[in-house]
Amino acid sequence: MHGFNADTEALGEAILQYVENRMRLHPVPLDGPKTLEELQAVAGNTITAEGMGGLAALKLFGDELAQACLSNDHPRYLSFIPCAPTEAAVMFELIVGASGIYAGSWLEGSGAVFAENVALRWIADLAGLPAEAGGVFVPGGTIGNLSALVTARWAARARRSASGCTAPRPTKVAAQQESHSSIRSACEVMDAQFVGVPGDEHQRLSGDNLRAALEAEGPETFFAVVATAGTTNFGIVDDLGSVAQVCRDYGIWFHVDGAYGGAGLAAPTVRHLFTGIERADSFILDPHKWLFAPFDCCALLYRDPALGRGAHAQKASYLDVLNNAEWNPTEYAIGLTRRARGLPLWFSLATHGTNAYTAAIERTLEVTRFAEAEIVRRPYLEALREADLSVVVFRRHGWESEDYHAWSAEMLREEFAFVVPTSHEGQTVARFAIVNPTTSEDDIAAILDTMA
Ligand SMILES: Cc1ncc(COP(=O)(O)O)c(C=O)c1O
């Protein structure tokens, strides 16, 4: 089973050919879900005592299983938040898997950790965080938000202990009520209380609304405030500057969830929306969303990484040999064993340079503005609000919920596009999330034509 032989060699060639063939396609097939019965019928029992052989398993995957998985990188995949990695990043993912790297500690993975930290530094610089800022790549925004909030609580407790404070411990987290579900879920995990703050007239969390909510509940009962830099449903960026100021006034941890929108930091046309992020105590950005890295990759950054280490470093006698190292990524988030998931991003950044990233993000913003203009131009459509970033939400006059769902299902059935509806204030509406630079104006127009 282990060792390189003629079978392994043939399998290696076939796998590389598979990857190359897929990358050559434009567009890749959209594909679509199959039922459990359909998959059982075509795949059967794939794990047997004797094994089916690598080439047969690869063929089964390519012919059946892969085709039952939607291609997130299809240019007309505009649902949720898609993932459109660069070819360089995708190919390097193969190398990461093949290199036997443990990227939890400096002792074991210094070269990989060094490179990941360079990529983290680039993101920290985009945000304007200080030179000491640092963190780790975690699997996704959910774990990133949870890890940051655990650190916020740890820091609040440490400060209280140091000052001899005897008042009850703070147990609450404030965020705009439309913030991502992972914030509520983090609060559940931590047995903390989520306090949803109403948005301002632009549906943003702003300093005034936040201050009112903190005062109503008692500011001393909060250990963190979460601002969102790009909400999932609408792409709204909270008023980070005024929120940062209120957090400073009350001495509450300021976390920014830029899982989707944080990539906008690299785009000059929207960079101004992020003013205030440089004051964040912690910040997350998912390169697997709008920064062209493959799943699963979330950059988690702390202004003062020592606090992250205080909250997360695991202590065990067998880990003592790792102490006092340059940088052990595992000490900054939930989880011990970790793969070098930041390396594909690093490799792609090193390959293409940061200007290419700026150009690619700006291209998606250009297509977003085209979509908005087309929605205005077409009398049967209406946008719900102007896009801050690259999410457009709009309604088709005269359609009920079932019309949106039927339209969406038909487009998927034909492998034409994947655009699922969302809802706003109880109404079903259509939504595009445009993070793929290969999505063109023609793609948008073709989808809108189907709503006529
Ligand atoms: C704003 C925001 N925060 C957090 C998350 C959760 O990220 P993940 O799906 O990587 O766990 C998402 C996912 O869409 C998001 O849009």
Image: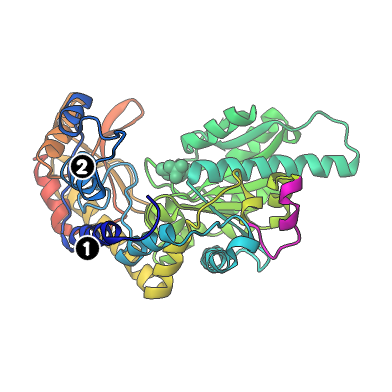
Residue 325 lies within the magenta run:
yes
On the rendered structure, is 32 left or right of 278? Answer: left
- Identity, as a three-letter code, of the amino acid under mark 2: Phe
On the rendered structure, is 361 left or right of 160? Answer: left
Q: Position of residue 79 (x, y in %)?
A: 28, 42
Which secondary structure lies at badge 2? loop
- The C terminus - image quarter: top left
Q: Position of residue 97 (x, y in %)?
A: 42, 57
In this picture, which residue range is highlighted in magenta?
Answer: 317-328
Which secondary structure lies at badge 1? helix
Vertical comparison of 16 with 331: above or below: below
Is any atom of residue 415 visible in this view?
yes
- Identity, as a three-letter code, of the amino acid under mark 1: Glu
> How far apart are labels 2 and 1 at the CA level?
24 Å
Question: Mark 2 packing: few (<14 Cα in 10 Å), some, or many (20+)?
Answer: many
The residue to which callout 1 is attached is 20
Q: Position of residue 418 (x, y in %)?
A: 20, 42
The residue to which callout 2 is attached is 418
Question: Mark 1 packing: few (<14 Cα in 10 Å), some, or many (20+)?
Answer: few
Q: Position of residue 301 (x, y in %)?
A: 59, 56
Residue 223 lies within the magenta run:
no
Q: Nearer the viewer, residue 72 or 229?
A: 72
